[in-house]
């Protein structure tokens, strides 16, 4: 080994670790975004189902749907009574990525009601 090459392996190892950390942070951010999207869809599904069920018993479906969405980590942004006991709910769930980025909340739409 030449005298002027001493320490070059250390530089390569440190650079490799930096790349590995960057890839891991990116992967975790994507996984967190997918999980947030799934939470939004679950909250929308449950909110729409709760709204349709509540309406069948004479309660205000959108109020019950909003409470259900909130209980599941979301916020009911729109609730539409489509008639016939069918409700369409749009829910948003906040998303805060690991690295600072200008991204909005995850949102999902669900529709529920009697069949037939």
Image (cartoon, rainbow, N blue to C red):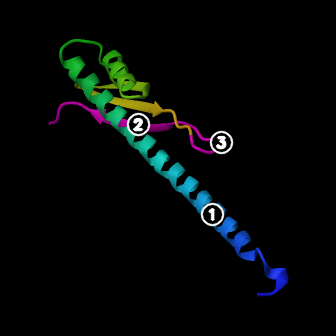
Q: Position of residue 91 (x, y in %)?
A: 42, 31
Quadrant in the rendering for residue 26 = bottom right
Does residue 79 appear to the left or right of 2 in the view shown?
A: left
Foreground disc of the pair 1, 2:
1
Other-residue count near label 1 (Cα within 10 Å), few / some / many at <14 / 14–19 / ≥20: few
Q: In the picture shown, does residue 36 fall above or below 77?
A: below
CB of mark 3 within 8 Å of CB of mark 1? no
Other-residue count near label 2 (Cα within 10 Å), few / some / many at <14 / 14–19 / ≥20: many
Does residue 107 appear to the left or right of 26 in the view shown?
A: left
Give whichever of discs 3 and 1 has the lower sequence position: 1
Location of mark 1 (residue) = 17
Does residue 113 appear to the left or right of 101 in the view shown?
A: left
Quadrant in the rendering for residue 38 = top left
Quadrant in the rendering for residue 97 = top right
Quick one: SS at disc 1? helix
Location of mark 3 (residue) = 100
Quick one: SS at disc 3? loop
Q: What whole-number distance in Å separates the C-alpha atoms at marks 3 and 2?
A: 21 Å
Residue shown at 78%/78% (left/top)? 6
Location of mark 2 (residue) = 40
């Amino acid at each position: 080994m030449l005298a002027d090459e001493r320490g070059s392996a250390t530089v390569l190892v440190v650079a490799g670790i930096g790349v590995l950390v960057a890839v891991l942070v990116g992967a975790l951010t994507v996984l967190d975004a997918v999980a947030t999207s799934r939470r939004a869809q679950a909250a929308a599904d449950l909110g729409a189902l709760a709204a349709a069920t509540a309406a069948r018993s004479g309660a205000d479906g959108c109020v019950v749907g909003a409470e259900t969405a909130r209980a599941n980590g979301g916020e009911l942004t729109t609730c539409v009574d489509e008639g016939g006991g069918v409700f369409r709910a749009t829910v948003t769930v906040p998303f805060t990525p690991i690295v600072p980025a200008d991204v909005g909340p995850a949102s999902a739409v669900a529709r529920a009601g009697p069949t037939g």
